Every structure is written in structure tokens, then in C-alpha cells.
Image (cartoon, helix red, strand yellow):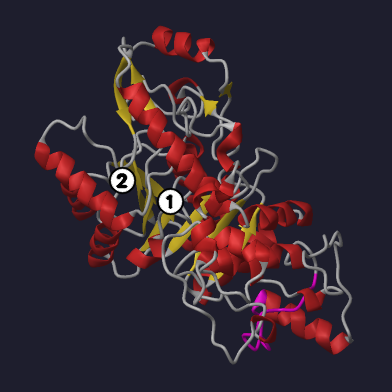
């Protein structure tokens, strides 16, 4: 039995994951551009990548607030992208816009905004102005723009009130009735239920699981299906933490059907340690409840694309189905993004130490942790998995799965009930350590054969 699925290392997400952030970063912070704000320096110094200074002749404040500032490291870009203080009385942080509706300057403007929002005749292709908070809201747009700034390769984003609403809405918007989806096995329990039960029963979309981390199995599965409309990848997978080769998966899917779409749930590693768009994914999804929110005090999700056409379809379904995220939540997410690199890098450091310590415990059969493959059966497998991880990922993340000895539910529950510092609760990516048993909790709806 797996002893965890979501960052279950005994100390992988301890309360002090963000403490003393300057202890290893002060030297690099001095190399940051002096024109960047103090907050920008604190966020950007997490990366070991050199920063490219912004053009000297174009100050950030003079550029569009929609500019993702690609020349900066994402942890710096997120501070300034999506918002200028000049938009709100020079406030460094945006206010919370708790307004359900927004006034038009004229009747003609109102008519034009609705044409743009609904894509009806007269739409000039320009994003609509503020209309109604089911369609758009300043705080939501600020968060979406900042996510584009941190997700390499993305151009558009659509925020949702939960990760599952982002996943389900994106699939409903982009996969046609009668379509077929192959999805990573295993996959998060909620995603599993939606793809296996809801899609065929309610949407007329068939689906089947595949071990997408195995190149041979994935290639055979894609070749065998009569049609492929979407490949849904969760990498690392929940809870086995197996890694799928995104570039390979995209190539196989597009060879089968050039119009097929590849979705990647990047919750466990992104945007800090993995960037699926750089490997040609079509849609990247997150449960923002996890690392992006990072404090176990909100629920949210987001879908990102590199295509105006795809995001228009997703937003169209969001508008009509109504999964609306609140401005208070998007304000909190905007706040949390500023410390994302600090938190995730610190969590990964601690998780590596925990994984190493737990691996030698006599009651532990095996530890599953991205980038650490010493327990694999052969040298060839170890080398192949390490090579893929090094090519696709820039860090381990802080998720740990533990197989205990003996491999029984009673033994797993004894471990869970004996923990002290860790919380016995689902979710992940926050300041506290969370531990759970997937088979009896988050993945309890999965069939025995799956």
C-alpha cells in the first residue's frame, strides 16, 4: 500500500519551509538589477538561472501591464506583471474588487463588450472590457496575467474556483462529443472519476487509462485506439510519482491525430520545476489550492494555453456553466505567487532529506521520489528514468510516496495514526506536512483493476 500521495514526507512541508529565506540567497540577490523592487529581488533570487535585464530604454511601468516580462526570471516577472500601481492610486498591491458588475461608459461600449465576450457578429477580436464578474473581474485577470508570466510558453489563462472545475471545464470545452481520451494511470481520484464515469455517461466521451510513463505501453495504446482526441497526462503521477515524457507523448499523439490535444496536470512540479509548454503541450492545468496557494486557506484552479482559440473555448464554457472564482481568492493567489519559488525550493530541499532518511528505515519497503531511482530493478531503468527527469524537470518537488513493510492497510494505518508533527489530511503544497493513504482516501473511488 502507498503510505501517501500528496507530499507525504514526514517533514516535506513543515511549518518552517519558508523560514530564513535569505540564508543561502543573499549573494545572488546582490546580482539582481537595482531597478527591481525589493519584493522582486526576494522572489527572483530563488533561481540559479541568470537574469536577463529588461531593455534600458523601456521601463516596466511604461509597458503594458499585460506584458509577461519574459526577459526576467519568472519569480521576478510575477511581481510586476499583470498590474501597475498607476491603475489604483499608486497602491503597490491591487485592491480587492468585490463588485459583481461594472459600468459602461456608453451604451455603444456595452454593446461592443458583449459582442466581444460572446464572440457574436461585431466581435473585433479584442478582449472585452470589464462586464460582469462571471465573465471577468480585475483581480481574476491580474492573477491570470501573473500565471502567464510564471508559466513558460503560455500566452493565456483562465482561473477557476477549484482544480477539478478547471479540468472538467477544459475537457468539456475542447473534447468533442464522441471523442476519445487516453489518460495517465494512475491519476488523481477526482480526475479519474470525471474521465471514467462522467465523460462517457453524461458527455458521450469515451476514455481509457494507460501507463503513460512507459514509452512502449503508451505507443501501443495510442496505436490501438481507432481515434484519439485528447491525451491527458499527470506527471508526476498521483500517487506513484512516475514521470511521463511529455515531448514523446505529444509526438505520439500528434502522429496519431494532428488535431488531438495534450493536457498536462502540472500541479506537483510546476511552474517552478517543470514547464510542459516547452515540450509542446496544448493545455496546462493546476489545482491552485496546492503549491500556488500554498497555505491551506483557499481552493482554486487554472487552465493555461498558448492558443487564443483554445482559451476562447474554455472561457466560453466558463461563462455559461458559471464556475466563478471570487476576487478575494484571486487576490490571495496573487499574494502567494510572490513567494512560490522560495516555498517550493525550500520544500524540495527538505523533502530530499526526508526521502533519504526514510528509505533506510526497516519498516519501509520502498520510497518513490522524483529524481531518486536507486531502488529500480536494473541499471538501465535507473539511467533511463534519471535521464528523463534531468531533461524535463529542474527539481524534485516535495512529494514523497512510501510503501511500508508489511504492505498491508493495517500497517499503513498504524504509521499514519502514529505520526505527531504531520497532519493526517488530504491536499499538499502548503506550509504544514500532510500525510494520507490514497487507496482509502483520495483514490478510494478507483476500481480494483485500475
Viewer-closest of 315 and 408: 408
What residue sits 25% from the left and 55% below the top?
A: 226
- Return the x and y of residue 54 as percentages of the image width and height: 54, 81
Image mark for residue 4: none
Magenta stretch holds residue 183: no
What residue sits 71% from the left and 56% below the top?
A: 330
- Return the x and y of residue 75 as percentages of the image width and height: 55, 62
Say whether marks 1 and 2 touch (CB < 8 Å). no
Q: Is residue 348 left or right of residue 302?
A: left
Q: From this viewpoint, is residue 13 visible?
A: yes
**Quadrant housing the C terminus:** top left
The quarter holding residue 249 reads: bottom left
Q: Which residue in the structure is indicated by mark 1?
A: 205
Q: In this view, does 386 lie to the left or right of 169?
A: left
Q: Of callouts 1 and 2, which one flags the residue occurring earlier in the amino acid sequence?
A: 1
For marks 1 and 2, give the CA distance.
Answer: 26 Å
**Quadrant housing the N terminus:** top left
Q: Is residue 232 above or below residue 238?
A: below
- Return the x and y of residue 250 as percentages of the image width and height: 29, 62
Circle 2 SS class: loop
Magenta stretch holds residue 119: yes
Residues rendered magenta in the picture: 118-131
Magenta segment's dominant SS is loop
- Return the x and y of residue 425 as percentages of the image width and height: 58, 25
Q: In this view, does 71 lie above or below 416?
A: below
Image mark for residue 243: 2
What residue sits 53% from the left and 53% below the top?
A: 341
Kindly report which numbered mark, 1 or 2, lies closer to the viewer in this rendering: 2
Circle 1 SS class: loop
Amino acid at each position: 500500500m502507498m503510505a501517501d500521495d500528496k507530499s507525504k514526507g514526514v517533514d516535506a512541508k513543515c511549518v518552517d519551509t519558508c523560514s530564513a529565506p535569505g540564508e543561502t540567497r543573499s549573494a545572488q540577490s546582490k546580482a539582481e538589477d537595482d531597478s527591481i523592487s525589493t519584493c522582486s529581488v526576494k522572489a527572483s533570487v530563488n533561481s540559479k538561472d541568470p537574469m536577463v535585464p529588461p531593455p534600458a530604454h523601456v521601463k516596466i511601468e511604461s509597458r503594458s501591464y499585460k506584458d509577461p516580462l519574459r526577459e526576467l526570471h519568472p519569480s521576478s516577472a510575477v511581481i510586476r506583471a499583470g498590474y501597475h500601481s498607476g491603475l489604483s492610486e499608486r497602491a503597490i498591491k491591487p485592491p480587492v474588487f468585490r463588485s459583481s458588475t461594472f459600468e459602461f461608459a456608453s451604451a455603444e461600449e456595452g454593446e461592443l463588450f458583449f459582442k466581444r465576450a460572446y464572440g457574436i457578429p461585431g466581435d473585433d477580436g479584442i478582449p472585452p472590457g470589464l462586464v460582469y464578474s462571471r465573465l471577468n473581474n480585475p483581480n481574476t485577470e491580474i492573477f491570470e496575467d501573473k500565471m502567464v508570466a510564471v508559466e513558460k510558453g503560455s500566452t493565456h489563462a483562465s482561473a477557476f474556483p477549484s482544480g477539478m472545475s478547471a479540468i472538467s471545464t477544459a475537457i468539456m470545452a475542447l473534447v468533442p462529443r464522441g471523442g476519445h481520451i487516453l489518460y495517465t494511470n494512475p491519476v488523481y481520484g477526482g480526475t479519474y472519476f470525471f474521465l471514467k464515469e462522467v465523460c462517457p455517461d453524461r458527455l458521450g466521451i469515451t476514455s481509457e487509462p494507460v501507463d503513460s510513463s512507459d514509452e512502449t505501453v503508451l505507443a501501443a495504446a495510442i496505436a490501438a485506439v481507432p481515434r484519439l482526441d485528447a491525451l491527458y497526462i499527470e506527471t508526476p503521477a498521483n500517487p506513484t510519482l512516475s514521470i511521463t515524457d511529455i515531448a514523446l507523448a505529444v509526438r505520439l499523439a500528434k502522429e496519431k491525430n494532428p488535431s488531438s490535444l495534450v493536457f498536462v496536470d502540472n500541479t506537483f512540479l510546476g511552474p517552478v520545476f517543470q514547464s510542459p509548454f516547452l515540450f509542446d503541450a496544448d493545455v496546462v492545468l493546476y489545482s491552485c489550492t496546492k503549491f500556488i496557494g500554498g497555505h491551506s486557506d483557499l481552493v482554486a484552479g487554472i487552465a493555461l494555453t498558448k492558443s487564443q482559440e483554445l482559451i476562447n473555448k474554455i472561457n466560453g464554457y466558463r461563462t455559461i456553466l458559471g464556475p466563478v472564482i471570487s476576487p478575494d481568492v484571486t487576490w490571495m493567489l496573487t499574494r502567494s505567487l510572490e513567494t512560490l519559488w522560495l516555498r517550493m525550493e525550500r520544500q524540495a530541499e527538505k523533502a530530499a532529506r526526508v526521502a533519504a532518511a526514510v528509505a533506510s528505515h526497516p519498516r519501509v519497503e520502498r520510497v518513490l521520489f522524483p529524481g531518486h531511482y536507486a531502488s529500480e530493478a536494473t541499471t538501465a531503468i535507473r539511467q533511463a528514468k534519471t535521464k528523463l527527469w534531468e531533461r524535463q524537470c529542474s527539481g524534485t518537488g516535495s512529494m514523497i510516496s512510501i510503501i511500508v513493510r508489511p504492505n498491508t492497510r493495517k500497517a499503513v494505518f498504524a504509521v499514519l495514526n502514529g505520526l505527531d508533527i504531520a497532519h493526517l489530511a488530504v491536499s499538499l503544497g502548503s506550509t504544514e506536512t500532510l500525510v494520507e493513504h490514497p487507496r482509502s482516501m483520495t483514490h478510494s473511488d478507483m476500481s480494483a483493476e485500475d
